[in-house]
Each structure stands twice: as C-alpha cells, then as structure tokens.
Image (cartoon, rainbow, N blue to C red):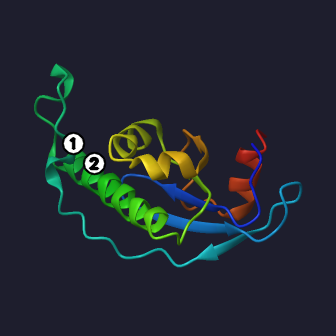
Amino acid sequence: MILPHGAVVAVVDGAKFELFRNSGSEVDPTLSILEAPDLESHNKSAGARRDSSMANPTGHQLDEDAHAAAVADWLNTQVQTRQVDRLVVIAPPRTLGEMRRRYHKELVAALAGELPQDLTGRGAQAVIAALRGK
C-alpha cells in the first residue's frame, strides 16, 4: 500500500490507539509517533447489532466496541477540521468493522487505505512492513 507523505496511520484495537505520521516519502515511508488522545468510551450502545450472535454481548465486548466508536468519532473530527488530510486505519477485523459503521463521508474520502490486522504495540517498523505486504 502506498502511504502518502504526511498521511496519518491510526493503529487501533479494542483497548489501544496509536498514531503515526509518514514524515518520509511514498517510496520510503518513515513513521513518526504522534500523541494519541485519551478517549472516553462512553458509547456502550456502539456494539448493539442486529444479528443474533451479538444479541447479548459481554461487557468486555461492549467496552471494545465503545473504544472503537470513540476512536472513529475522534478521527471523524480530525478529518472534518482538516487536522488530517490522508488516513490509513489498521485494526483487527471486528474493530475495523465497528469503526466503519461510524465513518463520516469526509473520513471515507480521506482514507488512503485500511488494513485488517492487529498491530498495536508492534511499533513503526511492523506497521511499515504490513503496509508493504510483508
């Protein structure tokens, strides 16, 4: 995946949120760590689903879904206020699905890509390797 210069990479799972910015080029990306905000995950209804397998989600799953919703809401705000122009989101498939439900149309337009993987805590080099498909 090509990572435009200046693009922000959000690495998310059900409890963690990491941010990087490509300070290098598209050909030779260099990820700089950005400070991720402390998010309040109050939206416990974020995990409410229509399918029967999630009819009674656990408190843990509700917490993870609320975290994903809080990250998506924060990213929406960053895109809408032009703090982020290009964005890549990396998250486990379930978390990514929960986030997609909350993407604003401007965030969708700003997406340079998504990667359904759990890379939280793995560092910038692991993120670059995953984006390169290694």
**Residue at the top extreme, as displayed:** 52
* Element at label 1: helix
Q: From the viewer's side, name the closer residue of 72 and 14.
A: 72
Give the farthest residue toward the left. Answer: 56
Badge 2 amino acid: Asp
Q: Which mark is residue 47?
A: 1
**Number of marks in the image?**
2
Look at mark 2 in the image and give the residue it sits on: 65
Using a 10 Å C-alpha cutoff, classify the residue at mark 2 as few (fewer than 14 neighbours), some (14 to 19) or many (20 or more).
many
* Residue 117 % position (x, y): 56, 42
Residue at 15% x, 53% y: name it. Answer: 44
Q: Is residue 88 above or below residue 51?
A: below
Report crowding for label 1: few under 14, some 14 to 19, many 20 or more residues within 10 A (C-alpha). many
Q: What SS does tag 2 mark? A: helix
Give amino acid for label 1.
Answer: Gly
Q: Is residue 113 above or below residue 21?
A: above
Q: Earlier in the sequence, mark 2 or mark 1?
A: 1
Image: 81 above or below 108: below
Work out whether residue 79 or residue 57 is closer to the camera in this orientation and state it: 79
Coordinates of residue 74 in the picture (x, y in percent): 38, 65
